[in-house]
Image (tube, grey):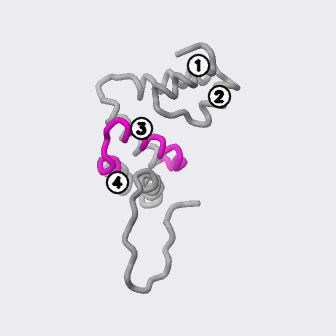
Amino acid sequence: MSGDPQDYIDDMARTRGYVLDYHKKMAKHDFPVLQAANGLVSAAYLDQRSLDRRTKELIFIVSLTVMRASKGHIQSHIRVALDLGVSAQEILEAIEISLPEAGVVAFQAGFDAWCEVVGADGLEPTVEVHEGGSGAGS
């Protein structure tokens, strides 16, 4: 990666397929720390080692879901996974792993992010019922 902050962000976008808001701001305000953090992320996640990129992306999506990351952050990784050829069903099954481990609230955040990216809808009851809302936190 380049030593120029703008080139670095552009390279990051090309390599990862996404750039988060904190990447953009850190590039401008504390570039050396961004480079250091990116080195760790590259070694643990981006560089090809034993696990392939598809598997790592699924693990990342589940981790973000369990940590209750922002919907946009989860969605950026769902999109990358789809770009890598991971199916929408495979992503859903990975997110579902969070249900018994992290609980319904964490699962719903990841599930809601997935629904928006893949355009999933649901069934509406045909009987009278109170509106339950999305179940996701505000």
Q: List the single residue furthest toward the top.
A: 3
Q: Which portion, as a residue range, is magenta?
A: 67-92
User: Which of disc 1 and disc 2 is earlier in sequence?
Assistant: 1
Taking depth in this image into account, of 33 and 116 the one nearest to the observer is 116
Q: Position of residue 64 (x, y in %)?
A: 46, 44
Q: What residue type is disc 2 on?
A: Met
How far, Cα to Cα, is label 2 from label 1?
A: 14 Å
Q: Is residue 101 above or below residue 127?
A: above
Residue drawn at point x = 62 percent, y = 15 percent: 4
Circle 1 residue: 7
User: Which of disc 4 and disc 2 is earlier in sequence?
Assistant: 2
Circle 4 residue: 96
User: Which is closer to the viewer, label 2 or label 1?
Assistant: 1
User: Which of disc 3 and disc 1 is earlier in sequence?
Assistant: 1
Number of the label disc, if any, that sits on residue 80: 3
On-image quarter of the C terminus: bottom right
How far, Cα to Cα, is label 1 from label 3?
A: 21 Å
- Evaluate if marks 4 and 3 touch, with contact meaning CB atoms under 8 Å apart: no
User: Which of disc 3 and disc 4 is earlier in sequence?
Assistant: 3
* Helix, strand or loop at mark 2: helix
* Helix, strand or loop at mark 4: helix
User: Which of disc 4 and disc 1 is earlier in sequence?
Assistant: 1
User: Which is closer to the viewer, label 2 or label 3?
Assistant: 3
Q: What residue type is disc 3 on?
A: Val
**Label 2, residues with CA under 10 Å away: few <14, some 14-19, many ≥20:** some
Q: What residue type is disc 4 on?
A: Glu
How far, Cα to Cα, is label 2 from label 4?
A: 33 Å
Circle 2 residue: 26
